[in-house]
Amino acid sequence: MDISVVFQIAAVGILVAVLNQVLTRAGREEQAMITTLAGLLVVLFWVIRYVSELFVEVQVIFNL
């Protein structure tokens, strides 16, 4: 895993937090919630790949 992935996830988190605050202050709570969920889904899709690689490595280490 590369350290740039951590920075990408942090960047998405910061972007989503800023958008959430802007939309909430503008009175658009529904769009703020959708933006937060979209950011969460994007990060989860990135992380799922690394979790599957982790499980493969564990299987190889323990010869399962």
Image: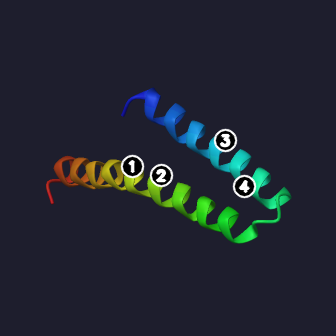
SS at circle 4: helix
Task: Single out the mark in the foreground, 4 or 1.
Answer: 4
Residue indicated by mark 3 = 14
Lateral position of residue 44 relative to residue 59, left or right:
right
**Amino acid type at image mark 2:** Val
Q: Residue at x 39, y 29 (%)?
A: 2
Identify which residue is drawn at 31% across, 51% down.
49
* Residue kind at label 3, given as amino acid type: Ile
Q: Secondary structure at mark 1?
A: helix
Residue denoted by label 1:
46
- Tell me the mark number nearer the camera, choosing from 4 and 2: 4
Circles 2 and 1: CB atoms closer than 8 Å: yes
> Which residue corresponds to mark 2?
43
Residue corresponding to mark 4: 20
Q: Residue at point 34% right, 47% down? A: 50
- What amino acid is found at the position of numbered circle 1 in the picture? Trp
* Earlier residue among tags 1 and 3: 3
63 lies left or right of 20:
left
Nearest to N terminus: mark 3 or mark 4:
3
- Left or right, 4 with respect to 51, comes to right
Q: Name the disc covering residue 21, or none.
A: none
